Image (cartoon, rainbow, N blue to C red):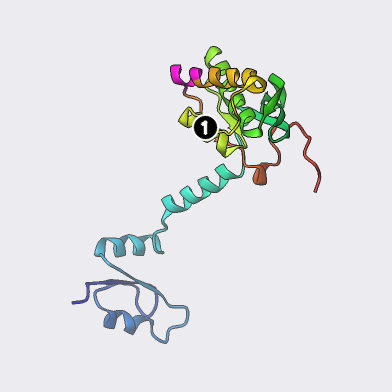
Amino acid sequence: MAKKKYYVVWSGNKTGIFDTWEECKKQVLGVKGARYKSFPSKEEAEIAFKNGSAPMKKSIHKKESSSKKQSATFIEESISVDAACSGNPGVMEYKGVYTKDGKEIFHFGPVSNGTNNIGEFLAIVHALALMKEKDSTLPVYSDSRTAISWVRKKHVNTTIPRNESTEYLWKVIDRAITWLNHNTYSNKILKWETKLWGESKADFGRKTPR
């Protein structure tokens, strides 16, 4: 059995709310510029007739608009980190800057036998530790999904061996993991969207032009 519908006619032979399609049809068929629409309840039909149009789903549009706006910009009041590595593994260093003006806040390295992801991981933890020391909740941006994942898991999934040549680097990594295991933080760790915003504000500027 078909569900009951109510028909609103805003422009036609007669305007109003009609209980059947037959009644509505008499008011709109053959009428130039006729405006009408069916609704599943009389309440919705009354609201639509009173407003002069069908109600807009404002919450959906607002949500979509907010999402687009959020992805189109970054938070200036934040810390951005980046790493640079000559080779993989190779000589690695990292730094953190204040995103709004690019002013350098900290810098580490260079050290041997590192990778970009290790550098990004250490930079994120460095930023978190510094912000905790300063009692700051500024978010931290990194363009490495891998490093962000390592921070959240409190584990570095790297193939860099532990030997004499990597002893110092592993001490720094272990110290970072220990900090994560013994501290909490409220800072958000966010992905820097290079395709939308260009290179990170902490970028070393050493990429080879294509």
- Against 154, is 72 above or below? below
Tell me the crowding category of disc 1: few under 14, some 14 to 19, or many 20 or more residues within 10 angstroms, Cα based: many
Observer-nearest of 192 and 16: 192
Q: Residue at x 42, y 50 (%)?
A: 59
Magenta span main SS? helix
Tell me if residue 181 is in the magenta stretch. yes
Q: Could one spot residue 184 in this view of the protein?
A: no
The quarter in which the N terminus is drawn is bottom left
Q: Position of residue 50 (x, y in %)?
A: 35, 61
- Against 182, is 26 above or below? below
Residue that lies at the very extreme toward the bottom in this rendered image? 30
Read off the residue under disc 1.
150
Name the amino acid type tagged 1. Trp
Tell me if residue 85 is in the magenta stretch. no
Q: Could one spot residue 32 in this view of the protein?
A: yes
Q: Position of residue 98 (x, y in %)?
A: 66, 24
Residue that lies at the very extreme toward the front in this rendered image? 163
Stretch of the chain drawn in magenta:
178-185
Observer-nearest of 13 and 8: 8
Observer-nearest of 72 and 113: 113
Q: Secondary structure at mark 1?
A: helix
Q: Residue at x 57, y 44 (%)?
A: 71
